[in-house]
Amino acid sequence: MAALQKIPAPEVLHLFIEHLRGERRLAEKTCEAYTRDISEFLGFLTTYLETTVTLPDIVAVEARGFRAYLAQRRRGNRPLSAASIQRQLSAVRTFYRYIERRWDAANAALPLIRGPRVKRPLPKAVSAAEALKIVNTPLDSPGEPWIAARNQAVLALCYGSGLRISEALALTGHDVPLSRQIQLTGKGNKTRLVPILPAVAEAVAEYMRQSPYQLSPDEPIFRGARGGVLRAEIIQGEVRRLRGALGLPETATPHALRHSFATHLLAGGGDLRTIQQLLGHESLSTTQRYTDVDAARLMDIHAGAHPRA
């Protein structure tokens, strides 16, 4: 590798951002975020190295320098969360990849650096009582009973069968009347069999009886008020209004019903591997997060009810 020019750090940053704007065509907000993150990193290097930073200095940063940067991010005047630190570290990695391609200058230490572990948030399930309130309470405007039936059918599929709202809205005339199980293709183009409870099948059948629209087998069965394909935002908005009327928590959403489907099966003795298949999770570790949800619920019960709590 030839000797690197002593290009000042601000100029290296400028070239990097122009690359993001021009060649990669990233959005301006994204470029602004990269500018902010890399500026902070270069500012740290100036203080850490006690010199005016140039391109060779950037390339030569050792592992202890990167670790000092991460420590400063976590314990500085404005400490960042683990997720924010990981995001900034990702920006730094992108910056160094650009430098390696542009000047054929790789940093040997950065691949060895690991950011803080980010704890994934627990799925926000609602209780069985709250789920039943959402599913069974009419969500229509006066004079439109078929819309109430439609909304209840969609939510019944989310809670009774663990469908994502997008999967429920993708059901077509080929799928009805619903049998004891249906085959659907979900996230990641993954196909799975989904059991259908009698109450769920009846909710969908009731909507089909009331729907004013004649549908072909290839069309989605759930329609908007004017006959177009129903959008997820419509159901989400209706649940928000219902949430206020019933005094439910903000975590009560259509997608929360899918989480509730999993946690309530688990609490009832459901097998984790079976629940994984029902939800269509690629990895068992994704499904295992629901054991944490159930454990958290049990801890809350213990704290509130145990005589020595």
Image: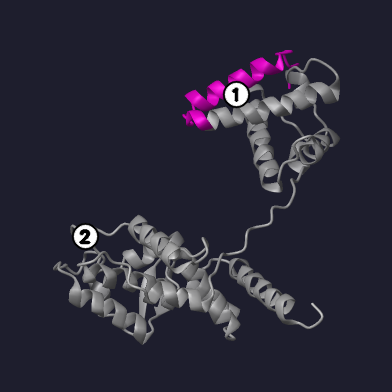
Mark drawn on residue 225: 2
Residue 56 drawn at (x, y percent): 76, 20
Residue 209 lies left or right of residue 106; in this view the side is left
Residue pictured at 79% horizontal, 21% vertical: 46
Numbered range of the magenta stretch: 1-29
Q: Is residue 85 above or below residue 208?
A: above
Residue type for callout 1: Phe
Q: Quadrant of the C terminus?
A: bottom right
Q: Is residue 152 visible?
A: yes
Viewer-nearest residue: 64 or 161: 161
Q: Is residue 277 visible?
A: no
The structure residue drawn at horizontal position 58% and vertical position 66%, both measured from the top left corner, is 283
* Figure quadrant of residue 269: bottom right
| Mark 1, residue position | 16
Q: Hey, which quadrant is residue 301 in on the image? A: bottom right
Query: Which is more N-terminal, label 1 or label 2?
Result: 1
- Vertical placement of 83 versus 264: above or below? above
Residue 12 is one of the magenta-drawn residues: yes
Location of residue 102 in the rendering, given as x and y in whole percent from the top left corner: 62, 23
Q: Name the secondary structure under disc 2.
A: loop
Q: CA distance from mark 2 to mark 1?
A: 49 Å
Q: Which quadrant of the figure has residue 96?
A: top right
Identify the residue at horizontal 29%, vertical 76% (top origin): 204
**What residue do we see at 18% from left, 57% from top?**
226
- Amino acid type of the residue tagged 2 in the rendering: Ala
- Name the quadrant of the N terminus: top right
